[in-house]
Image: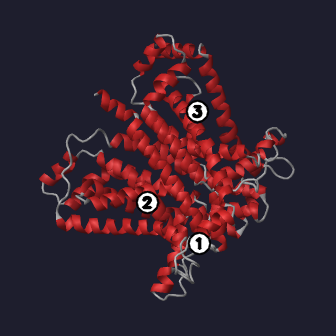
Amino acid sequence: MARSQGAALDRKKLMADPIMVCTIVVLIAFLTLFILYPLAILLVDSFVGDGGGFSFAVFQRIFAMPNFTTAITNTLKVGFLVGIISTVVGLLFAYVEVYVKVGRVVGGLFKVVSMLPVVSPPFVLSLSMIMLFGKAGLITRFLLGIYDNNVYGFWGIVIVQSLTFFPVCYMMLKGLLKNIDPSLEEAARDMGASRSKVFLTVTMPLLLPGLGNAFLVTFIESIADFANPMIIGGSYDTLATTIYLQITGAYDKAGAAAMAVVLLCITLLMFAVQKYYLEAKTAATLTGKASRGRMLIGDRSVAIPLTILCGLAAFFVIMMYLCVPIGALFPTWGYKFTPLTFKWFGQVFTKYKGLRAFRDSFVLSMVAAPITALLSMIISYLVVKRRFKAKGFIEAVSMLAMAVPGTVLGVGYIRGFSGGLFHTGFLSGIYGSAAILIIVFVVRSLPTGTRSGISALRQIDKSIEESAYDMGADSFKVFMTVTLPLIKDSFLSGLVTAFVRSITAISAIILLVTPQFLLITVQINEFAEKGSYSIACAFATILIIITYGAVLLMNLFIKFFGTSRKLKEVE
């Protein structure tokens, strides 16, 4: 009775606040129009036959294509293997950092490895793999004298994606391992169990839901990845590349829509398992913080081998990333490596319209980033601090974009907006414009910012905001003057994350970008496909400097002006 009365009171307060009602209506319209609508159009296109009625003809046609069924098998094989390798390697790194005494050098390498995939374009390691281990590779051809090495195909994709995605697993599992109470493991050790038995019988059972979570996140990232299979896949087709080629090569939009639906169904299934089953089990299994600090493993027979193994792996990953700026300094990759030259960096701006590409990418990302950050905080605020019927819809749809591969979203926008809304011509003007690229950037980055905002808002006692309401402030003033300053760190983090994700995006925008705009990632992809690796590396190097600089500036700003600093000063 009390709960229903409280809910009724909350609804009454909400309806009496026109600013909040308008915000909710606009937000629902945005999420429906730019997330649900493109996906619904894909379903409609896939199930509507030539006569206009319900039909499975398009699905029957695409499943009759040998390359499509092969692409499904290839995608699942790559996804499962990459998920397993990334989870195992991520667990090893996380275990060593949390449980083993490591030196500052190795600890620094770990931090760099966790940062690199965030600030670099998604296909940098593919470029490095080709330049180091391809037929004209620096290591295979010039150091080892191997001329018939083929780095393209299944193993090329698996290695590159595993190196790209294992830091994600490492960051996830590191947090879970830190939350395990060390007294549980120490009790088993006191009873005579060896370290391996403690790990297998105590640590692993507590960690299993987290391992499953890490595997599924990596699996979804792997099967949705477009850039790496496109560059290093060769003739090994995956679903993402097949969908792209079905539109750009066969001009079969209906077939591409049906293929996109198949890929979307796979990712949504995995996302549902990860979100509603494994996350719940993880939260229920790893409860509370440790009562005291963990005694790190100092046994040299354990610490030295693990530290060396992880240190070498981290060093190898960093060298792979360093290969990109180094490759941009060689006169001709694969044939002439001396003397070092900066001509490719010059040609980026003089011959290949690099200034325009960086300007377009930078401006579009700078416009999308604050919109994404503000939308994320508003959604987080509504989900955590407000009670209304559409709250579940807003949370679910905003997080849905996380499970939608970029290629699928790109096809959905083509089918949904090229002829206008429901093919009426309304809103057809945004197709091919800067607006649709900005919208895609916002939609793709929205889930990350929303999760960060929800975590931050749950730490704020609602009595702080209620005091402002009691003094006569409306919802807009409370949000801008009370809530937003308290979650300033999350807002700034979401702002920079959105900028970095936008300026390094490729899978969704490669189908939507027109000659009117030059984007850096599209340029890099084109030059890599042509085999112009030096110029591709020059573009990628400048892009990494821009993104890394943005992250450093954000960290410095939070350090000197963030909420945590102000709280320390108050204490």
The residue drawn where x is 41% and y is 35% is: 561
Q: Between tags 1 and 3, which lies in front?
A: 1
Q: Residue furthest top?
A: 471
Q: Is residue 69 visible?
A: no
| Location of residue 350 in the rendering, given as x and y in whole percent from the top left corner | 68, 65
Quadrant of image for the C terminus: top left
Query: Element under label 1?
Result: helix
Give the Cα separation between the discs numbered 2 and 1: 27 Å
Q: Residues within 10 Å of mark 1 (few under 14, many from 20)?
A: many
Residue at image mark 2: 166
The residue drawn where x is 53% and y is 54% is: 546
Give the Cα separation between the discs numbered 2 and 3: 31 Å
| Location of residue 378 in the rendering, given as x and y in whole percent from the top left corner | 55, 30
Residue at image mark 1: 534
Kind of residue at badge 1: Ser
Residue at image mark 3: 394
Kind of residue at badge 3: Ile
Q: Earlier in the sequence, mark 2 or mark 3?
A: 2
The residue drawn where x is 33% and y is 65% is: 310
Q: Is residue 330 visible?
A: yes
